[in-house]
């Protein structure tokens, strides 16, 4: 029989030096185990016993601790590391039995380190432990504390300018089990046009007395009725969010892909509607007298039997001061029929969970989101997950005990929020796409890390004008990107006449003679698009000296205009030796 059993909560070595919580899913019989990571990551799930540590849940601190205490391991001296002096109480009593732990509790810092007092009485031995920049003890590859010997200290270089760090105290958790169903309210988000989903939600709630009586509909915000200029102008979404959205459309980026690394967290207008719908739910909670709200999206397909009772069981384990508690997310399984929620709740300490189709949020959590999530810059589940984890009061039911379930969008394909990547279906379509890119010098550059350039490349004229209206816009105005192009290049390639004219009218625009890496002047870019007024404005600039410049294919602006069929413009440029 293996050291671990299915259902055990463990800490697994994900990669070098990175240990994360997981549940043992299967004993493979060869001293390896298949685990399910708490954060839902589907990679690197087969682990040897040496890469796992059994954990137990501390109900008082609402966190996990290792079951078997490890003795400090001696590290070979390598490079300079930070060192703190730590006093550890060595108990004379027998080793703790399986399932017990010799926990260490941080006390006030000693003059040269952190004094640590154990639970058992005994002799005090002073040892030196290697710590990171934040004062946290470092672990070796086996998860043991790294002890530094006195002789290892010789020749070590102290860190210059390092501030003395206060020892990290565990966050105090509020009272547990004090919240009740009567303290809460139920909200479900539903688009007016999705009457089918409304009926499905009512049917799911029907068998549950509390849920059916307390479930209030939140009319979802329809993304089809939104516009980016209005959303940014109302400070509901950031300017960066709009640029990212347009860039994603131009680059054929999708929010849903087979490989998570290929997914984009940019906002579609449907995604904006989703974010604003959750914002309405948070405000509804604050406008009520309830202490917490259960928020559901109308694409739920499953609620566990006796949902009210299972939710009550969750409340009995939930700290009173929680911010967000997920009752399900996109990787995991629902509570099996005939079984009941036992917990323990998992406190999320890093990463974020995908999916906001069934979660609880407290008044404090709603205030947190309204203060820090808005204006939105990414999809709402990304923003909520990150903020809740950073706050330190984010909890979730463990995988296998979900109270609700909704299939991933890539399975249901029924979404107003997400997008799927559309690729050319035939070789001929692929060739046409590649030829179109090759024919347009501006199309080869899809994005820039300079806001004004990026907005121009995405064809966002109004965003460019908004950026140009900012007092600090001079830097973006004259900055040159990795291809050597200015904002005027980018605006001209995109055919944005108004933006080009606004740039040329600025007395602080000094890069009118800029030549990019392909030999293109700003006149080349304007001539390519047939922007006659822009070309005239460029030629009127007294400091412009690149009228006769040739690109890497030995083309002048005039010859480029002829090539693109702008014959009248070409004649005008020839008169200026262009």
Image: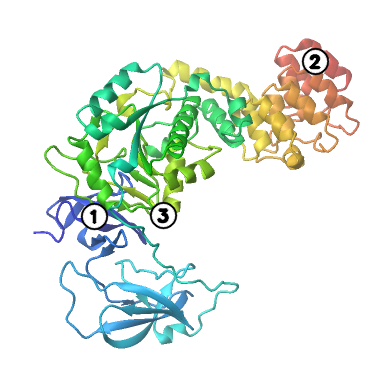
Rendered image quadrant of residue 421: top left
- The numbered dot on residue 392 is 3
Q: Which numbered mark, 3 or 2, is in the foreground of this view?
A: 3
Asked which quadrant contains residue 150, the reply is bottom left
Q: Is residue 289 visible?
A: yes
Query: Label 2's element?
Result: helix
| Percent position of residue 104, x then y | 32, 73
Residue 47, which numbered label? 1
Instruction: Check the picture and name the quadrant holding the C terminus.
Output: top right
Q: Local crowd at mark 3 within 10 Å, few (<14), some, or many (≥20)?
A: some
Say whether residue 375 is left or right of residue 532. left
Q: Is residue 519 visible?
A: no
Q: Which of the two discs, 1 and 3, labels the residue nearer the N terminus?
A: 1
- Which mark sits nearer the N-terminus, 3 or 2? 3
Sequence-wise, the earlier of marks 1 and 2 is 1
Disc 3, SS: loop
Q: Position of residue 524 (x, y in %)?
A: 75, 25
* Horizontal and vertical percent position of residue 152: 43, 83
Q: CA distance from mark 3 to mark 2?
A: 64 Å
Dot label at residue 570? 2
446 sits to left or right of 16: right
| Residue pictured at 19% horizontal, 69% vertical | 100
Q: Are marks 3 and 2 in contact (CB under 8 Å)?
A: no
In x, y percent, where is residue 388?
42, 48
> 96 and 321: which one is in front?
321
Mark 1 and mark 2: Cα distance apart in space: 68 Å
């Amino acid at each position: 029989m293996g050291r671990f059993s299915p259902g055990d909560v463990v800490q697994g070595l994900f990669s070098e030096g990175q240990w994360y919580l997981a549940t043992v899913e299967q004993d493979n019989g060869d001293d390896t185990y298949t685990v399910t990571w708490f954060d839902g990551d589907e990679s690197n799930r087969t682990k040897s016993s040496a890469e796992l540590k059994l954990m137990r849940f501390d109900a008082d601190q609402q966190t996990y601790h290792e079951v078997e205490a490890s003795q400090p391991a001696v590290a070979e001296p390598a490079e300079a590391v930070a060192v703190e002096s730590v006093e550890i109480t060595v108990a004379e009593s027998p080793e703790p039995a399986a399932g017990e732990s010799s926990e260490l509790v941080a006390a006030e810092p000693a003059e040269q380190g952190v004094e640590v007092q154990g639970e058992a009485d005994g002799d005090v031995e002073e040892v030196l432990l290697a710590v990171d920049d934040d004062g946290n003890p470092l672990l070796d590859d086996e998860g043991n504390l790294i002890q530094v010997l006195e002789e290892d200290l010789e020749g070590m270089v102290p860190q210059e300018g390092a501030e003395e760090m206060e020892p990290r105290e565990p966050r105090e958790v509020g009272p547990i089990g004090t919240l009740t169903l009567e303290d809460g309210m139920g909200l479900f988000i539903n688009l007016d046009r999705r009457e089918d989903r409304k009926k499905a939600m009512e049917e799911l709630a029907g068998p549950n007395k509390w849920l059916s009586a307390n479930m209030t509909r939140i009319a979802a915000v329809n993304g089809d009725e939104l516009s980016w200029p209005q959303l940014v102008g109302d400070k509901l979404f950031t300017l960066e969010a709009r640029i990212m959205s347009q860039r994603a459309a131009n680059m054929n980026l999708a929010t849903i892909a087979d490989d998570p690394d290929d997914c984009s967290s940019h906002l579609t207008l449907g995604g904006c509607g989703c974010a604003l719908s959750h914002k309405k739910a948070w405000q509804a909670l604050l406008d009520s007298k309830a202490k917490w709200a259960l928020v559901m999206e109308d694409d739920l397909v499953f609620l566990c039997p006796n949902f009210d009772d299972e939710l009550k069981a969750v409340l009995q384990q939930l700290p009173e001061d929680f911010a967000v508690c997920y009752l399900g997310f996109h990787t995991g399984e629902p509570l099996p029929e005939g079984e009941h929620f036992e917990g323990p709740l998992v406190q999320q300490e890093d990463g974020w969970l995908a999916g906001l189709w069934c979660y609880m949020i407290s008044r404090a959590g709603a205030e947190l989101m309204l203060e820090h999530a808005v204006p939105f810059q990414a999809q709402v589940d990304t923003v909520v997950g990150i903020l809740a984890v950073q706050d330190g009061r984010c909890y979730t039911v463990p995988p296998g005990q979900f109270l609700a379930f909704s299939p991933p969008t890539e399975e249901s394909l029924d979404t107003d929020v997400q997008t799927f990547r559309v690729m050319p279906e035939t070789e001929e379509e692929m060739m046409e796409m590649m030829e179109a890119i090759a024919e347009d010098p501006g199309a080869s550059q899809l994005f820039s890390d300079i806001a004004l350039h990026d907005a121009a490349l995405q064809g966002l004229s109004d965003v460019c004008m908004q950026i140009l209206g900012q007092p600090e816009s001079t830097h973006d105005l004259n900055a040159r990107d990795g291809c050597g192009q200015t904002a005027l290049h980018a605006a001209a390639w995109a055919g944005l006449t108004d933006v080009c004219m606004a740039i040329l009218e600025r007395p602080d625009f000094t890069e009118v003679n800029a030549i990019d890496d392909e030999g293109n002047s700003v006149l080349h870019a304007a001539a390519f698009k047939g922007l006659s007024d822009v070309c005239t404005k460029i030629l009127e600039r007294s400091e412009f000296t690149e009228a006769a410049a040739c690109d890497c294919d030995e083309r002048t602006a005039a010859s480029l205009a002829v090539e693109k069929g702008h014959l009248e413009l070409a004649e005008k440029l020839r008169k200026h030796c262009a």
